[in-house]
Amino acid sequence: MEHKEISILGAGLVGSLLAALLSQKGFGVDVFEMRGDPRSQKIGEGRSINLALSHRGITALKRAGVFEKIEPALIPMMGRMIHDLKGNLNFQSYGRASQHINSVSRSGLNNILIDHAESHGVNFHFDHKCSQVDLESVAMDFDDPSVRSVSSEVLIGADGAFSMLRRALEKTDRFNFHQHYIEHGYKELHIPAVNGTFAMEPNNLHIWPRGSFMLIALPNPDCSFTCTLFFPFEGDLSFDSLKDDASVLQFFETYFQDVLPLIPDLVAQFQTNPTASLVTIKTSPWVKNRSLLIGDASHAIVPFYGQGMNAGFEDCRLFMEWGEKLKFDWDKLLPYFSNHRKADADAIADLAMKNFVEMRDKVADERFVAIKKLESRLQEAYPDSWIPLYSMVTFSDIPYSKAKKLGELQEQIMRALPDDFDPMSHPLVPIIESFNALKKDVL
Ligand code: FAD
């Protein structure tokens, strides 16, 4: 058996970033990844090919000194571009003038993180599929019997939503595990560039909200867009119901008319591209002896707040900050991380579920739009007091659990507004006063 100082399972987004951060601190880090080296491969089918990167993720990338390598490839998205049934467009900004989220290629980002970690001395072992973890001896075996087992001072499972390390934890006493597949799945579709330019306005996240389902599109550096259809698996209007080419075409003609001319091979793409499921996973504790779960392995969430990777990157930043505070005493740090991060992971999981309803339904609603306008006036007038929930989650480091609580208070206040309130003239002072009073009780 080989012995390592720190082993990380999974060279995905979180494992690669954490490896770089730990190696920069002087630890010996080995990363074991079941896939081949992604730098010499094409992107895996069925995974989302672009992601929204925002403040929390950027903060962690800056800490690792890698953000400047990623920044040139980012496409800023200033707000939501809502497409109604008739193809009319309505823009809703995400926050204040300069605040935006960023579309980034998953594989491009992953490759940069692996390169960066490697340049700081991390050893990557690709084609190493972990088949079993022994939590007592902090050791793991691999699928390939010719590969020697590895024991480690510390083992970190960054091996995603279907983590092998978590599987070992599931067999231990008092381990809590909650898994929920939502009724919707997703399918990705590709809008190609037109004569070398974007087929739609590139600096927005496009949304076609249709009540119980939706289509979204994020821009890519090659002037194409990646669309994702979030749609129920079963029911009258579902993936199941779109059995043949004609029904697919009819579905897009009815609900996404303005998309049809943008995807010439729509039906072929729809029939060929995989349909994938969406899962929320909550677990606790994330630690046993010297083994720890991190990222999706401990808290996989649905993608509707664009926060899964951002939360995983924030895990890495906090792990390092708390590590410094606790002098990297692993027996203190691992349980501390698990105990102190859990509430925030649960909060963003709940917020992400809630945001699905907002994205697919409420963004098209007049009252929702009016509330957003009022909130933007409130934020302008009282920037230290009223930060809209979306901004707290996306543009700040406020712990997710605190943002969730404050968001609930904001919602309570907004619910009490009369049906016909005017967002541009409604008095702000009474709102701020009641918010401040409520905050005192809750925080
Ligand atoms: P993963 O990225 O899943 O990486 C895990 C790694 O472990 C993989 O490389 C895998 O091959 C490896 N592995 C697994 N098992 C083993 C094993 N037994 N042995 C060895 N290696 C193993 N997040 C955002 O912040 N913004 C977004 O816009 C966004 N959009 C999304 C859209 C969709 C449709 C989906 C599904 C997710 C989205 N996410 C988004 C979430 C984001 O993809 C995840 O949170 C992120 O990938 C988690 O990173 P990770 O490193 O923890 O796990």
Image (cartoon, rainbow, N blue to C red):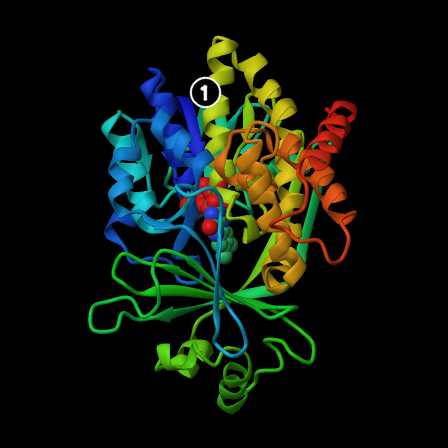
Residue 105 seen in this snapshot: no
Q: Amino acid at mark 1?
A: Met
Residue at the location (62% across, 52% down)?
A: 355
Residue 66 vs 280, above or below: the answer is above
242 vs 74: above or below = below
The answer to whether residue 118 of the structure is visible from this angle is yes
User: Where does residue 351 sit, x and y in percent of width and height?
Assistant: 64, 45
User: Going by the image, does 341 lie left or right of 270?
Assistant: right
Residue at 53% in and 40% down: 391
According to the picture, the residue beneath numbered tag 1 turns out to be 320
Of residues 370 and 297, the one drawn nearer to the viewer in this rendering: 370
Q: Is residue 386 left or right of residue 263?
A: right
Of all residues, the one furthest to the left in this rendering is: 196
Identify the residue at horizontal 35%, vertical 59% (top origin).
219
Q: From this view, report whether residue 116 is shown above or below residue 336.
A: below
User: In the rendering, at what x and y percent does residue 76 appear?
Assistant: 35, 49
Quadrant placement of the N terminus? top left
Q: Could you say which is closer to the camera, residue 405 or residue 385?
A: 385
Label 1 CA crowd tier, 10 Å (few <14, some 14–19, many 20+):
many
The relative height of residue 225 versus residue 398 in the rendered view (above or below) is below
- Considering every residue shown, the one lying at the far bottom of the view is 246
Residue at disc 1, CB closer than 8 Å to ligand 1: no
Whole-percent x, y for residue 285 in the image? 67, 29
Q: Considering the image in quadrants, where does the C terminus appear? A: top right
Residue drawn at x 61%, y 47% as measured from the top left? 374
Label 1 element class: helix
Residue 256 in the image: x percent, y percent?
Answer: 50, 77
Q: In front: 54, or 149?
A: 54
Give the number of marks.
1
